[in-house]
Image: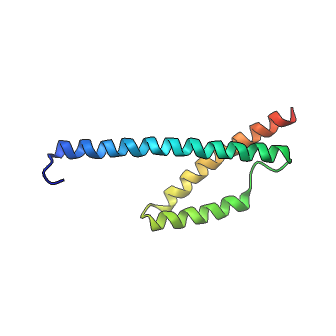
């Protein structure tokens, strides 16, 4: 990689970042497909949209994974909380539609 100019290195790095971003979007889409199914299951069985004990376990698990990956655990927790808020909103909407 030392034979590359700074501009070429920058282009390679940005290309890698673009590929990672695309993979993240696809993985998030798959995650939301799974959570939509969870939402339907919860709605069918009158289960609450949120599961605070699971969320707490997941935060602990993700913080540990983040530390092992040399990623800021606070960032990992913020990301998870953002995603969970969206999931709960979806689950609530699914439950409302199921009751209608």
Q: How many marks?
A: 0
Residue in the image at 70% along x and 60% along y: 54
Q: Which residue ends up furthest to the top in the rendered image?
A: 100
**In the rendered view, does 93 fall on the left or right side of 68?**
right
Residue in the image at 21% along x and 47% along y: 9
**In the rendered view, does 79 fall on the left or right side of 9?**
right
38 vs 62: above or below: above
54 vs 86: above or below: below
Residue in the image at 33% along x and 46% along y: 16
Q: Quadrant of residue 37?
A: top right
- Which x, y percent locates residue 11? 25, 41
Where, quadrant-wise, is the C terminus in this rendering?
top right
- Which x, y percent locates residue 87? 67, 45
**In the rendered view, does 61 fall on the left or right side of 52?**
left
**In the rendered view, does 85 fall on the left or right side of 64?**
right
- Which x, y percent locates residue 98? 83, 36
């Amino acid at each position: 990689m030392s034979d590359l100019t700074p501009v070429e290195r920058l282009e390679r790095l940005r290309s890698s970042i673009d590929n990672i971003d695309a993979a993240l979007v696809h993985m998030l889409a798959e995650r939301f497909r799974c959570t939509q199914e969870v939402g339907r299951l919860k709605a069918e069985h009158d289960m609450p949209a949120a599961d605070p004990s699971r969320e707490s376990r997941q935060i602990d698990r993700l913080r540990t994974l983040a530390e092992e990956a040399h990623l800021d655990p606070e960032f990992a927790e913020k990301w998870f909380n953002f995603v969970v808020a969206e999931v709960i909103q979806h689950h609530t909407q699914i439950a409302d539609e199921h009751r209608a």
